[in-house]
Image (cartoon, rainbow, N blue to C red):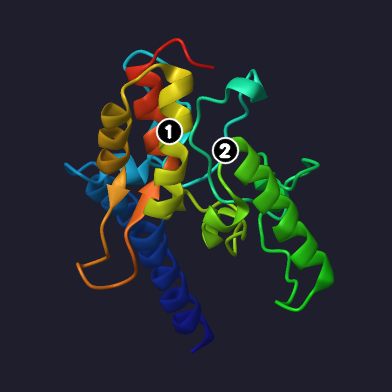
């Protein structure tokens, strides 16, 4: 009896090892090679032809301009893991996450006010003109999307610094705008990594 049970267990182990350790992974790999799935399966990397990947369209890492006084980039939402004095700047992807501060937190209100003032100065607008998503972090702190109003707020600065016509910059924003999921869920969002990649291709000298 014990021998038969051991033999049955061994056969089951061998079958599951072949099935789950070989056939299943190969099947998943084969599916990931199908047209339209290869890019997402590899991490949705962004790169120019012949160049090394510059990031992923799924991870919003804020660009740092070489000259903050002549900032040519579109910027993501702020991150709770940013170490910049104004609360903006790139997130630390190794410690992604929200601040876990409540809406009535004095620290959070202070941080939002500081972000609003910094963005208003950067975009040359009044603080009330700064959209809410520009000053509040997402749950992960690495959200690649911003709202169309926040993207529109940045268009005049980007056009001025890069030398591109305003309408050309607006076209780049439109090209990086994702609609609602399935046409009904959520709100349209502008993918900043994709947008900055398109901007770098349209104005190769920016940094």
Q: Quadrant of residue 24?
A: bottom left
Q: Quadrant of the C terminus?
A: top right
Residue sitting at x 75%, y 66%? 109
Q: Are marks 1 and 2 in contact (CB under 8 Å)?
A: yes
Secondary structure of the residue carrying tag 1 is helix
* Label 1: how many Cα within 10 Å (few below 14, some 14–19, many 20+): some
Residue sitting at x 35%, y 20%? 164
Q: Which residue bears the numbered disc 2?
A: 124
Residue sitting at x 41%, y 42%? 57
Residue most toward the front?
126
| Residue 20 placement (x, y as % from top left) | 38, 61
| Residue 6 placement (x, y as % from top left) | 50, 77
The dot on residue 113 is none
Residue most toward the top?
205
**Between discs 1 and 2, the one toward the N terminus:** 2
The residue lying toward the viewer, choosing from 46 and 119, is: 119
The residue lying toward the viewer, choosing from 120 and 171, is: 120
In this view, 206 is above or below 158: above
Q: Is residue 119 left or right of residue 58?
A: right
Secondary structure of the residue carrying tag 2 is loop
Q: Is residue 6 left or right of residue 87?
A: left
**What distance separates the C-alpha of mark 1 from that of mark 2?**
9 Å
* Label 2: how many Cα within 10 Å (few below 14, some 14–19, many 20+): some
Residue sitting at x 43%, y 33%? 156
In this view, 153 is above or below 186: above
| Residue 189 placement (x, y as % from top left) | 36, 55
Q: Which residue bears the numbered disc 1?
A: 156
| Residue 61 placement (x, y as % from top left) | 57, 40
């Amino acid at each position: 009896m014990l021998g038969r049970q051991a033999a049955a267990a061994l056969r089951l182990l061998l079958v599951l090892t072949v099935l789950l350790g070989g056939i299943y992974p190969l099947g998943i790999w084969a599916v990931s090679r199908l047209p339209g799935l290869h890019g997402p399966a590899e991490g949705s990397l962004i790169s120019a032809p012949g160049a090394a990947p510059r990031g992923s369209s799924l991870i919003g890492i804020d660009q740092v301009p070489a000259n903050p006084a002549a900032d040519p980039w579109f910027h993501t939402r702020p991150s709770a893991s940013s170490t910049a004095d104004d609360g903006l700047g790139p997130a630390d992807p190794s410690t992604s996450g929200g601040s876990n501060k409540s809406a009535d937190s004095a620290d959070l209100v202070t941080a939002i006010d500081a972000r609003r003032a910094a963005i208003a100065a950067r975009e040359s607008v009044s603080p009330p003109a700064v959209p809410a998503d520009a000053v509040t972090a997402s749950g992960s702190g690495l959200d690649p999307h911003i709202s169309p109003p926040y993207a529109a707020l940045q268009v005049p600065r980007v056009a001025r610094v890069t030398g591109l016509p305003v309408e050309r910059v607006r076209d780049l924003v439109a090209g990086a705008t994702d609609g609602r999921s399935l046409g009904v869920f959520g709100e349209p969002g502008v993918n900043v990594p994709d947008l900055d990649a398109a901007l770098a291709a349209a104005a190769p000298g920016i940094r």
